[in-house]
């Protein structure tokens, strides 16, 4: 059954990491569901391609930005606010691996992973909360990973550590929002192996010669979960979703 997102029609969403993979699929699904979608990422050309697909039937605009920099995150929120006011939905999807292994990671790679996967996600969530205070309903969805729940061989522990941190911060955010009685739901989605360009970057599984050890999730599988979360009645909060390909053994 298609989730009923009618109460979100015409509302605004910001999706980070929207130029590629999971973020692009989420942005397109939200656009198809009738939300206006702001797309963030560094690659202007790939963002524009995603926006063009959304604009066939919906509304989208792009904000190219490097989210490892505070000033760029501030510019992102200013740009969205100027166009649409405060957002209703934030999906924090931008992420990097932070080097191919814990023992080999360069300082800059470690810094980038901490800045993007943790600091930028938290900063964007705080900005979003500030704008959602006066709304009847808001949603923040953070993209974690199964490695945010356990450390797996072959996955750099620094990356796992950033996703563990994001999981704890998401719990903390949900608690603070509830204590202040703000009408904002906070959800963590933790996918297993997913077929995206991520695995063709240095350290990715596709570089090992065999594309994938088992059938991965597709980005659309995660986008479907986002729609499911938004479609639930306002009084229902999904806290955690862990999903993986049916063949994933760990
Ligand atoms: N693929 C998987 O197996 C898997 C599994 C579990 C969780 N995840 C998580 O899912 C999220 C999306 O990953 P994906 O698989 O879709 O990877 P992807 O295709 O490589 O997408 C990563 C996204 O992050 C953006 N990004 C990277 N550095 C950035 C920066 N400095 N500033 C702004 N945006 C930046 C990229 O945009 P630009 O290059 O345009 O900047 C891109 O849109 C990540 O948080 C990842 O940890 C992935």
Image (cartoon, rainbow, N blue to C red):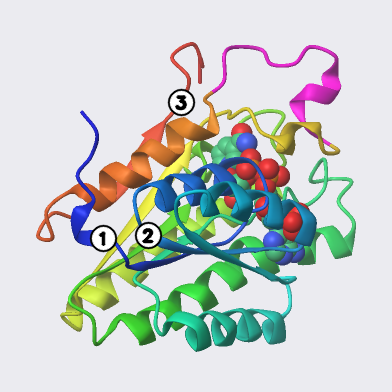
Number of on-image labels: 3
For label 1, the crowd category at 10 Å Cα-Cα, with few meaning under 14, some 14 to 19 and many 20 or more, is many
Residue with the mark numbered 2 = 35
Q: Assess whether residue 212 is covered by the magenta stretch.
A: yes
| Left or right: 154 in relation to 104 | left
Residue lying at 78% horizontally and 23% vertically, measured from the top left:
206
Q: Nearer the viewer, residue 203 or 58?
A: 58
The mark closer to the camera, 3 or 1, is 1
Residue position marked by numbered label 3 in the rendering: 244
Where is residue 2? Give x, y as percent.
24, 34
Disc 1 element: helix
Q: Are marks 2 and 1 in contact (CB under 8 Å)?
A: yes
Q: Can residue 160 be seen here?
A: no
The correct choice, above or below, for 72 with respect to 34 in the image is below
Whether residue 238 appears in magenta in the rendering, the answer is: no
User: Which of these two is toward me, 54 or 226?
Assistant: 54
Q: Which image quarter holds the N terminus? A: top left
Relative to 73, residue 22 above or below: above
Tell me the residue at 82%/41% (across/down): 100
**Which residue was labeled with disc 1?**
8
Residue 110 lies in quadrant: bottom right
Identity of the residue drawn at 74% across and 51% down: 46
Left or right: where 175 falls relative to 166: left
Badge 2 density bin: few <14, some 14–19, many ≥20, Cα 10 Å: many
Q: Tell me which numbered mark, 3 or 2, is placed earlier along the sequence.
A: 2
Lateral position of residue 102 relative to residue 176, left or right: right
Q: Which residues are magenta?
A: 203-216
Q: Position of residue 135 (x, y in %)?
A: 23, 81
Q: Residue at x 52, y 25 (%)?
A: 217
Helix, strand or loop at label 2? It is loop
Instruction: Residue 136: name its quadrant.
Output: bottom left
Looking at the rendered image, the disc whose residue lies closer to the viewer, 3 or 2, is: 2
């Amino acid at each position: 059954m298609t989730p009923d997102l009618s109460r979100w029609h015409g509302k605004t969403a910001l999706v980070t990491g929207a130029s590629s993979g999971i973020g692009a699929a989420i942005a397109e699904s939200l656009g198809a569901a009738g939300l206006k979608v702001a797309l963030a990422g560094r690659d202007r050309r790939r963002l524009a391609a995603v926006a063009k697909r959304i604009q066939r039937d919906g509304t989208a605009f792009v904000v190219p930005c490097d989210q490892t920099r505070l000033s760029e995150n501030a510019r992102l929120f200013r740009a969205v606010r100027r166009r649409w006011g405060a957002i209703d939905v934030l999906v924090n999807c931008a992420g990097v691996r932070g080097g191919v292994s814990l023992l080999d990671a360069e300082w800059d790679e470690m810094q980038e992973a901490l800045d993007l996967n943790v600091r930028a996600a938290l900063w964007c969530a705080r900005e979003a909360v500030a704008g959602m205070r006066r709304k009847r309903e808001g949603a923040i969805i953070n993209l974690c990973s199964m490695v945010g729940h356990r450390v797996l061989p072959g996955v750099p522990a620094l990356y796992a550590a950033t996703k563990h941190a994001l999981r704890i911060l998401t719990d903390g955010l949900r608690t603070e929002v509830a204590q202040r009685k703000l009408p904002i739901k906070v959800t963590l989605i933790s996918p297993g192996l997913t077929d995206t360009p991520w695995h063709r970057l240095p350290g990715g599984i596709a570089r090992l010669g065999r594309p994938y050890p088992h059938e991965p999730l597709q980005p659309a599988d995660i986008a479907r979960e986002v729609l499911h979360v938004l479609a639930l009645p306002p009084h229902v909060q999904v806290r955690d979703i862990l999903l993986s390909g049916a063949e994933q053994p760990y």
